[in-house]
Image (tube, rainbow, N blue to C red):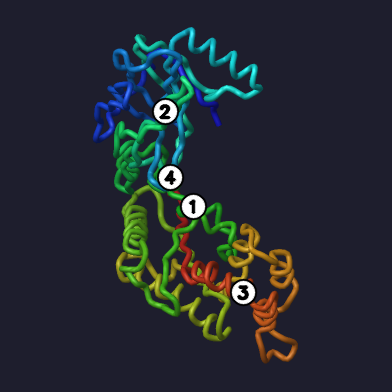
Amino acid sequence: MKKLYLIVLILSFIPFCAKGQCECVCEKITITDTKIVREGEEVVVTLRAQAQQGAIKGNASYAFSPVITNGEHRVSLPAVIIREKHTERIQKRNKKLSGQSPEFPDFRTARPDEPVVYSASVPFQQWMEGSTIIAESRSWGCSASQVYPDQLLAEGILPPAAPLTVAAVVSAPKFRTVGDSLSSVLSFVFPESQWKQGEPIYHEDREKALIIYYPECERNIQLDFENNTIILNNLLEVINALLAAPDNEITRISIAGFSSPEGSFAYNDRLAWERAVSVKEYIVKNTKIKGTLISLYNGSEDWQGLRAMVAASDIYDKKDILRIIDTVPVFSADGRRKERIRQLKNLNGGISYRYMFEQFFPLLRNSAFIKVYYSNK
């Protein structure tokens, strides 16, 4: 992660003007020409600032700092302190004598009559898309200090990039075949050489697969649930593009169905299988692919997925939960009860199980994972 930096030269960059730019009069300064751009993994903010005539007098100092925020998250950029030169010497001396550290370790000091051309950068974070940028400011000196209201500089900054479509990838191939082009940008498209005989979709592979979501106890695809319509449309576009391509062919489509562990095993096992079947039926109905090219895997109760969620969490009794999942059989020796679930329910008076039931199990009810394989002709 790059260190924050502050310079007074205007950078050369592709200009982007945020929506809702405004001139900000922050009590004692005027801020104009606010611009925000993304350069790789950095967000660069530039602006101009000028202290109002006679606004900062005597031994007073004034500081302002741009802040990017979306209401939930915020990140402050380096501050600028405006004060007279003799005030700077006095305040530094007082800080040294008192043993206190100076305010604003990352800042530039400017004089009241000096225009400030400001530029600073922070690492880009996804939440910054569509957020706002404000100015925080305060003054101190002469035995008094004051914090001023936040001032809006720009809103609707850093609009998200336009989504990459299948048509765009196919129409401008950088690789030998359509399949190679799609595989380079879509995580769920693979060359046939990456197929493993009898391969289920293990937890570590799931980020590479398309996921269809289901409401609790539902076995049929619900187009209006979560992002299913978008996901399925994307899948159909990919399948149709590969079917139409003269330079490759689909060798197989792998679909794995899962269910959450609570409830009857027989019911969960059937539910997981029927979820995979419903995806296959949808694909066959809406494309010209042969059903024989679609292979199904019944993941049944998704203990693998639950274990991964527990391991990545800070849940109480984590070690005991993982021990039970790893060492206790799903069924008792006589096969009459679900022993693993029983022990999880009894652990810590059921507190940990109730937490998993509320936080983890809903995420395990989503489960139909899809991968598409192709070969070049």
In the displayed structure, 113 sits above or below 269; it is above
Q: Which residue is mark 4?
A: 185
User: According to the image, label 2 marks what residue?
Assistant: 138
* Of labels 1 and 4, the one closer to you: 4
Q: Looking at the image, is mark 2 or mark 1 earlier in the sequence?
A: 2
Tag 3: Cα neighbours inside 10 Å, few (<14), some, or many (≥20)? many
N-terminal-most mark, 2 or 4: 2
Distance (Cα) linking label 2 and label 3? 50 Å
Q: Amino acid at mark 3?
A: Tyr
Q: CA distance from mark 1 to mark 4?
A: 11 Å
Q: Residues within 10 Å of mark 2 (few under 14, many from 20)?
A: some
Q: CA distance from mark 2 to mark 4?
A: 48 Å
Amino acid type, label 2: Arg
Give the foreground label among 2 and 1.
2
Q: Residue furthest front?
A: 143
Residue 340, placed above or below residue 63: below
